[in-house]
Image (spheres, grey):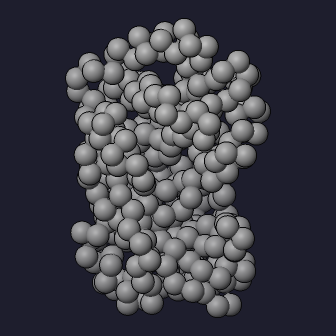
Amino acid sequence: MIHELTEADLAEMTDICAKSLDLEPHPWTPALVREKTLGAHDFDAALLLGYEIAGEVRGFTQAVARDHAGERRGWVRLMAVNPAWQRQGIGSALLSEVERRLAERGVTRIGFMDVPANYLTPGVDFQYTAAACFLTKHGYHVTHTNLNLMCGLTSDEFEDVDEDIVGFAQRGITVRRAEEGDREAIAAWARREFAGWEEEILACYEQSPISLWIALRGEEMLGFGAYDSNNVNTGHFGPTGLSEASRGLGLGRVLTRAALRDQRRQGHRRAVIPWVGPIRFYSKCCGAWTDRIFWAFEKPLRG
């Protein structure tokens, strides 16, 4: 009944997600499901599992094992069961099997959805009562909450960002879109300054145009603002960051607004700013407001 899924199952996986997981206002697409599963940089074929009966995939899960903060950690990145077949033990069977396989890989602690670098949401929406009950039943507990903001993109307020860019140029600071020739320097800088974000920053190079804005003084990297580094083409903004020495200059604002302008030009009416810490900054910078709250669930694993 439980077996490993492949590219041939992508359409069924997408259909299950569309029926069971709300992604409004953006529809589920095979490209997005592939990004979270088969196309992930940390993809492990043995951790993409489907529950099949009579040739029909009725539910599936995707998990990941990785070294994180000195520990072997695991996460369930995505789990969905066709609503027509829910409450029949499918989710429990999938979770039990993927936990077993993660334990075999040396994982000592498992989380749910809040996977660094590649995540659909940074945890379980606190309004998703059924998921909270399911995880509690299986021994998971809430460790903390994560927050998403939302930013409107319908006005033309971000179109004046070029004036700010000119102003910084007059002060000897270049703000521009990242180029292919910057890749190695940005990767090295990210490893020093923002090691947890290196993968997301470099994911911007998979987009056309490159979905990363950078600030430099000469050849010195000062900061970055990214979009489409995760959940591509759904209006996800970030991450963004500045080296400590360059904070307080206003660079965070211009990098953020340059990235948001690109998202507006893509046709998005709103941008999702996920997994947020500096709420006040985004409120002042672009009028963002608090949107969704997520519970981070985890439990210890023993092999």
Tell me residue 46's x, y (percent). Answer: 66, 70
Q: Exactly how many numbered labels are in the figure? A: 0
Tell me residue 39's x, y (percent). Answer: 60, 50
Examine the rendering and report whether any part of residue 86 can be seen. no
> Which image quarter is the C terminus in?
bottom right
Q: Which quadrant would residue 45 be assigned to in this image?
A: bottom right
Of residues 293 and 101, the one drawn nearer to the viewer in this rendering = 293
Q: Is residue 269 above or below residue 12?
A: above
Q: Which quadrant would residue 283 be assigned to in this image?
A: top left
Q: Residue at x 49, y 34 (%)?
A: 248
Q: Residue at x 41, y 72 (%)?
A: 144
Examine the rendering and report whether any part of residue 301 can be seen. yes
Q: Residue at x 25, y 46 (%)?
A: 289
Locate residue 134 relative to residue 115 in the image: left or right: left
Of residues 94 and 5, the one drawn nearer to the viewer in this rendering = 94
Tell me residue 269's x, y (percent). Answer: 26, 32
Q: Residue at x 35, y 14 (%)?
A: 160
Tell me residue 82's x, y (percent). Answer: 34, 69
Of residues 111 and 290, the one drawn nearer to the viewer in this rendering = 290
Of residues 264 and 293, the one drawn nearer to the viewer in this rendering = 293
Q: Is residue 141 above or below residue 264?
A: below
